[in-house]
Image: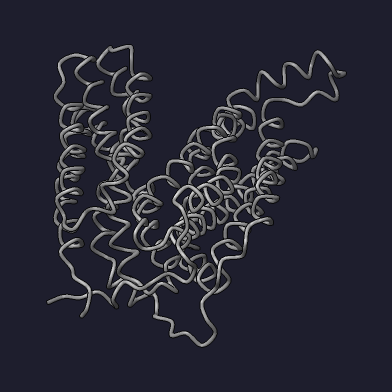
Amino acid sequence: MQQYLHQPSVDRTPPTSLRRAVLLPGLVAMFGLASLGAPLAVLPVRVDADLGFGPLVAGAVLAAEGLATLLTRPLVGRFADRRGARDATMLGLFGAAISGAFYVLAGLLPVSPITALGLMVIGRIAMGIGQGFLFSGGTAWAVILAGPAQQGRAMSWVGLLFFAGISAGALLGGLAGDIAHLFTTLLPPQLAPDGFLVAAVITMLVPLGGLPLVLMAQRSAPAPHGAAVLPLTAILRAIWRPTLGFGLAVMSYIGTTSFVVLAFLHRSWHNGSIALFVFLAAFALARPVFSGVCDRATGPRPVLLALAALAGGMLILGLASDEHTAIAGAIVAGCGMSMTYPLLALPVVRAVPATQIASGIGLFDAAYDVATLITPPLAGLIAATVGYSAVFLVLAGISLLAMIPAAAAWRRRPAT
C-alpha cells in the first residue's frame, strides 16, 4: 500500500484558537498582497498605450511575475522551513514594497520608454518573488499556529484573507485615476502625479503597513538544528497527486476569470461583469460556509463533490442558452472551486514532515503558477478555433479529470 512520507506529527508550536492562528498571518499577508492587485488596472495601460509597446508586450510584462513566482517557489519554501514562516512572510512584504519602488522610478524618472519598461519588469519580478513568500509563508504560518486539528479551516480562512487583500488592492488601483485627478486640483500641473504613479506609490507603501504586525508577532520556530531534511524530489513524490489535481482544477478558475466576460460579449449578452462578480463572490463566500468540512473529512467524497460542482458549473456556462442560466452556472462553479484548494492542500500538509510544511505548500502552490502560464493561451486557442462556449466545456472535462488524482490523494494512508 502506498504511504505517506511519515505519520502526521504534532506541529512545532502549540495549537491556538483558530481566530488567533489565522488573523495575524492573514492580515500581514493582506497588506503585501494588496500590492499584487493595485497595479493591475494601470500597468497594462502604461505599457500598451502610454509607452506604445502594444498588448503583446503588456501581457509579457504581466506574465513576468508569475514566472518569477514559479521559479522561486522551492527556494521560498526552503527559506520558510529553515528560518520560520513569519520571517518568510515579512520578506514577502519587502518584495511587494520593492516592486512598488521600481514602478515609482518608472513613473518619475525622465528615462526612455525601454528603460521605463525594464524598471517595470524588475518590479514585476520583485512582486513575483514576494508573492511566493506571502502565499507560502503566510499559509504555513497559519497552519503551524492552528495545529493539526484545525489545518483545513486555517487554510480556508487565511486563503479568504489573501483573496480580500488582492481585491482591496485592485480596488485602490482602480481608484488611482480619481486620486490623481484630485491632486490636479491641489497641486501645480507639473507636480501632480498621474494614475500610474499614484498606483505605484500605493503598491510601495501599503505593504509597509504589515510590518508593525509582523514585528509584534512571535517568531515562528524554524526547523530544529540538525533535523533531517527531505529533498524536494522526495516531497514532490509524496504530494504530486493533490498537486496535479489542484493544477487541473484551477484551470477552470483562471479560464473563467479570464474569458467569461468575453464569452458573454461574444454571445451578445450584457452581464458578463456580473457573471464574473458572482463567480468570485461565490468563491469567497463558500470558504467560511464549508471550511469545517476540511477537518472532518476522512476520505475523498468532499473534494469529489467540490470538483463535481466545479465541472457542473463549467458545463452550464458552456451550454447555457441564456445569460441568467450562465450566471447560475458561474455561482455553482465558484462554490465548487472555493473548496478545492483547502481540500487538496490538506493531504499535502499531512504528507510532509512538520518541519517542511512550507516546502510542501510552495510546491503545491506552484501548480497555480503553471496553470496561469498554460490556461490563457490554451483557452484563447480554443475560443479562436471552436468558440467561447467550447472553452468552458473543455474546462468541465479537465475538472472531471482532476477527480482521479484528487481521489488518489485522499486514499493514501499514513505509515503505521
Where does residue 35 sit, x and y in percent of width and height?
60, 41
Total marks in image: 0
Q: Residue at x 16, y 55 (%)?
A: 300
Task: Give the quadrant of the N terminus.
Answer: bottom left
Q: Residue at x 48, y 39 (%)?
A: 59
Q: Is residue 359 left or right of residue 247?
A: right
Task: Give the quadrant of the C terminus.
Answer: bottom left
Residue 293 vs residue 412, the one in the foreground: 293
Instruction: Reply above or below: 129 against 339.
Output: below
Where does residue 354 sit, x and y in percent of width and height?
41, 72
Instruction: Reply above or below: 416 against 326.
Output: below
Instruction: Reply above or below: 62 against 169.
Output: below
Answer with the quarter of the image where residue 265 lies. Answer: top left
Asked if residue 213 can be seen in this view, the reply is: yes
Q: Is residue 333 left or right of residue 77?
A: left
Furthest residue to the bottom? 226
Where does residue 123 sit, x and y in percent of width and height?
63, 48
Instruction: Reply above or below: 260 against 109.
Output: above
Residue 55 vs residue 157, the one in the foreground: 157
User: What sort of colour scheme is used for the picture?
Assistant: one colour
Residue 24 vs residue 242, the one in the foreground: 24
Asked if residue 68 can be seen in this view, the reply is: no
Residue 194 vs residue 83, the one in the foreground: 83
Furthest residue to the right? 188
Where does residue 197 sit, x and y in percent of width and height?
71, 32
Q: Is residue 206 left or right of residue 279?
A: right
Q: Residue at x 19, y 48 (%)?
A: 302
